[in-house]
Image (cartoon, rainbow, N blue to C red):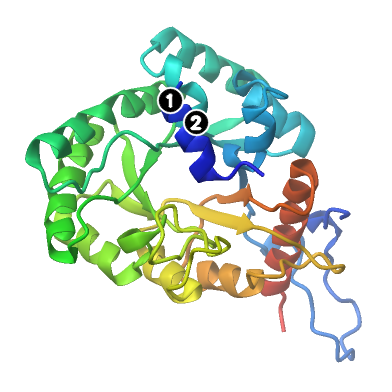
Amino acid sequence: MTNRRTFLKNTAYTATAFSLGGLTACSNPNSNTPKMASKKSIPPLKISLAQWSLNRAFFANELDAKDFANIAKNDYDIAAVEYVNGFYKEQANDESFWQDMNNRAKQAGVKNLLIMVDEEGDLGNNNDAERQKAVENHYKWVNAAKILGCHSIRVNAFGSDSEEELHNALVDGMGQLCDYAAKEHINILIENHGLFSSNGKFITNVIKTANRPNFGTLPDFGNWCLNEKWGSTQNNKCSEVYDRYQGVAEFLPYAKGYSAKSYKFDANGNETIIDYKKMLQIAKDGGYDGYIGIEFEGEDMAEPDGIRATKALIEKVWAEIYAVK
C-alpha cells in the first residue's frame, strides 16, 4: 500500500449500508426494547469523503483527480469532499483550473469543504526566514480553497524539536497564515499528524495563545503517534501513543471537521482498532454538528470496499447513539 509518507515523498520530487430512513418509533409501549428515535428526531448526518481514501487509485492514475467530486457522488453517494493538495501540485496557482474544479463539483451536486495541505514547509520552523517562507507557500492553497468555496485548509504543525521553541514558532507562523486566510474567509486547521501535533494539550494551547477566530482543528481518529512524523498509530515505528479518545475530545471544541479514519473491519462491520461509538459519542456530547469525513487507510480490503464499510458504520453508530432509551 502507498502510505501518506511514501506518497508525499514521491510528490515532493516530481457491507450493506445502514439506512437512517429505515428507523421508526417503536409502536409497542410495553416493550423492553429501547425505543429508536424517529427519523425526524435524529440530527442530520453529514458525511464527506477525504480524497486520501482513494490515494492508491489516484497515485496509480487509475482515477483522475479532476473527477474526484463526481466519483464521491456517483460511486459512493457522498455529496461533500476534502481534497489533498499532493494530487494538484502542478495546478496550485492555476485559478482557471480551480474554477473548473468548482464548476465540476457544482454540476455533481457536491460541496467542497477543505484542502489538506502537506509539504509546503514547516509553519513551526524556529528559523524566522524559513518559517516566513512556509507561511507564504501556503497562500496559494488558501486562494485555491476560496475559489473552490471551501471553508478551510488543513495544515501541519511541524517544526522545532523543542516544545517551547515549537510553541512560539507555531503561534507566530500559524498566526500569520490565519491573518492572511481571514481576508479570504478561510479557516486554518491543524490535524494531529504525529510528533507534537498529536499532543492534544500542546496543540490546543497553541490555538489559545494564537487567539485567531479562524484557527481550529481537524481531529483525526487514527493519527496519535508521538514519536513519528505523519503519526499513524499503525506504523510499526510508533512506540509512543497519545490516547486517541482524549486527543479527539481535546481537539473537539476547536474542530471545524471530524476525520473518521478507518483501517480494518470485523465480520459485523465494526472497525477493529477504533471504537466508532465512542468517537461519535464524543462528537455528540461536544455539540459537534459539522461533517464527518471518511478517510479509509486500510491494507486488507480494496479502497471502494473500505469507503463503503466506513460509511455504513458511521450511519449505523449515528442511529445507535441517538436511540431514545
Determine contact: label 1, label 2, CB under 8 Å: yes
Q: Which amino acid type is shown beneath numbered disc 1? A: Tyr
Question: Is residue 321 shown left or right of residue 189?
Answer: right
Q: Residue furthest left?
A: 128
**Image height of 317 relative to 49, above or below:** below
Name the residue rendered at 85%, 69% in the picture: 268
Q: Position of residue 76 (x, y in %)?
A: 76, 38
Is residue 109 visible to us here? no
Q: Is residue 46 above or below residue 74?
A: below
Three-letter residue code for mark 2 = Asn
Q: Find residue 121 and report its image quarter.
A: top left
Location of the N terminus (image quadrant): top right
The location of residue 265, given as percent across then percent down, is 77, 63
127 relative to 268, above or below: above
Mark 2 burial class by Cα count in 10 Å: few <14, some 14-19, many 20+: few
The spot of residue 172 in percent (x, y) is 12, 47
Residue denoted by label 1: 13
Nearest the viewer among 73 and 129 is: 129
Where 178 sits versus 100, above or below? below
Labels in figure, total? 2
Mark 1 Cα shell of 10 Å, populated few (<14), some (14-19), many (≥20) = few
In percent of width and height, residue 163 lies at 19, 65
User: What label sits on residue 10 in the rendered view?
Assistant: 2
Left or right relative to 53: residue 285: left
What's the distance in space between the residues labelled 1 and 2, CA to CA?
5 Å
